[in-house]
């Protein structure tokens, strides 16, 4: 009996050590609101329950294991959700369980290597310098806008391969003096022939290569990055570039970013530029006033231009729960396609107005 007790105690100690060296967490966020939406071009309006107006709802599974010697291994799985219907996002509904991210990594003194479906620092560059960001998420309407009709995302900050790229290999250098640098490559799903081992004609479309550099020093943040994506046509690429900065003055936070999508390799003068300015003014420990101004232009013609303005306020019930109210309006020229409402289905040239009252929660 004594030997059994000693053996049991030893096993318990080993189990406790293993448990201490690895961990798995489940987290996420939920955002829901009631909104009054109107598009003047179609002279239509509606009141509806919406999701993801201020923050993007998601469910996250993350795990890490301490390998010793300063090395770690782990995984990150994340799917988007639409709480007002209980469904996944459009991407997750298309047989994609983890539409936001699905990857594994190993890290140490050499930096970090991550493989899978990844949201890179480049894609989240507008999130990084968003002045409205707080412990309960920043305002989505202060990020670079999307196409009003849902037909394309050329005005967004991500590369042509999408918000989070599949089949990505990413290397993050060790942080040095506040500088964090990443390089990454996203492969086409079937760019290599299984029989010949050579690149399949046309299957290299969507292959993307890029980099991101972030700098953090005290209350200052800055970022710059670029992605080149192969598109239709021999040697043709689409380039996405972003640069931005934010600063916390204490009494007010300000941020700005410029996102450029250059598709002139395939379409003459098709180069779109979005400038977004964000601001947050903490009134007290619970109330913060927020706002953003957007200006979008395309070299093809001024008829593609668009502008948007957003104002709002948040009230923090706790460190994880906050209520908000926002008013967003966008004004487009005759073929303009810029939106910050999160609604789709209207036509180019539409002017939008949306008032939202909602709540967001982190868990």
Image: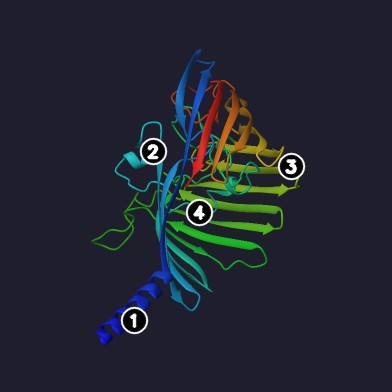
Marks 2 and 4, Cα distance to the nearest angstrom? 20 Å
| In this picture, residue 302 sits left or right of residue 191 | right
Q: Nearer the viewer, mark 4 or mark 3?
A: 3
Name the residue at 37% across, 37% down.
Answer: 90
Q: Which residue is mark 3?
A: 252
Marks 2 and 1, Cα distance to the nearest angstrom? 48 Å
Res. 89 image quadrant: top left
Query: Is tag 2's residue or tag 4's residue first in the polypeptide sequence?
Result: 2
Looking at the picture, does residue 59 appear above or below residue 298?
below
Marks 4 and 1, Cα distance to the nearest angstrom? 43 Å
Looking at the picture, does residue 217 appear above or below residue 235?
below
Name the residue at 56% across, 20% down.
Answer: 334
- The residue lying toward the viewer, choosing from 96 and 17, is 17
Marks 4 and 3, Cα distance to the nearest angstrom? 28 Å
Q: Is residue 62 visible?
A: yes
Q: Nearer the viewer, mark 2 or mark 4?
A: 2
Which structural element holds mark 3?
Answer: loop
Res. 321 image quadrant: top right
Q: Which residue is mark 2?
A: 89
The label shown at residue 120 is: 4
Image spot of residue 235 (x, y percent): 46, 50
The N terminus lies in quadrant: bottom left
Q: Which residue is mark 1?
A: 10
């Amino acid at each position: 009996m004594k030997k059994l007790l000693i053996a049991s105690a030893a096993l318990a100690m080993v189990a406790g050590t293993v448990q201490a060296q690895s961990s798995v967490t489940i987290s996420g966020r939920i955002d829901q609101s009631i909104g009054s939406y109107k598009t003047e071009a179609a002279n239509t309006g509606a009141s509806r329950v919406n999701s993801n107006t201020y923050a993007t709802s998601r469910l996250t599974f993350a795990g890490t294991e301490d390998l010793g010697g300063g090395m770690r291994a782990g995984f990150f799985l994340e799917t988007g959700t639409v709480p007002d219907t209980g469904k996944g996002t459009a991407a997750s509904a298309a047989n994609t369980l983890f539409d936001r991210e699905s990857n594994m990594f190993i890290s140490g003194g050499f930096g970090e290597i991550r493989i899978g479906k990844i949201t890179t620092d480049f894609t989240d560059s507008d999130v990084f310098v968003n002045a409205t960001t707080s412990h309960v998420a920043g305002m989505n309407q202060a990020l670079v806008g999307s196409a009003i009709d849902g037909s394309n995302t050329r005005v967004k900050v991500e590369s042509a391969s999408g918000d989070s790229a599949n089949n990505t290999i990413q290397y993050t250098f060790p942080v040095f003096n506040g500088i964090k640098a990443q390089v990454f490559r996203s492969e086409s799903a079937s760019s290599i022939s299984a029989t010949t081992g050579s690149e399949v004609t046309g299957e290299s479309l969507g292959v993307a290569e890029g980099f991101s550099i972030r700098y953090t020093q005290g209350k200052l943040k800055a970022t710059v990055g670029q992605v080149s994506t192969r598109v239709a046509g021999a040697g043709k690429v689409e380039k996405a570039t972003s640069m931005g900065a934010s600063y916390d003055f204490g009494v007010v936070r300000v941020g700005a970013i410029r996102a450029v999508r250059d598709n002139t390799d395939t379409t003459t003068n098709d180069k779109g530029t979005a400038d977004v300015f964000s601001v947050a003014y903490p009134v007290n420990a619970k109330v913060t006033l927020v706002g953003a101004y957007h200006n979008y232009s395309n070299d093809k013609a001024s008829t593609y231009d668009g502008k948007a303005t957003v104002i709002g306020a948040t009230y923090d019930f706790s460190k994880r729960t906050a209520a908000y109210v926002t008013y967003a309006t966008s004004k487009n020229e005759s073929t303009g396609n810029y939106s910050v409402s999160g609604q789709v289905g209207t036509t180019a040239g539409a002017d939008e107005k949306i008032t939202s009252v909602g709540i967001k929660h982190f868990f």
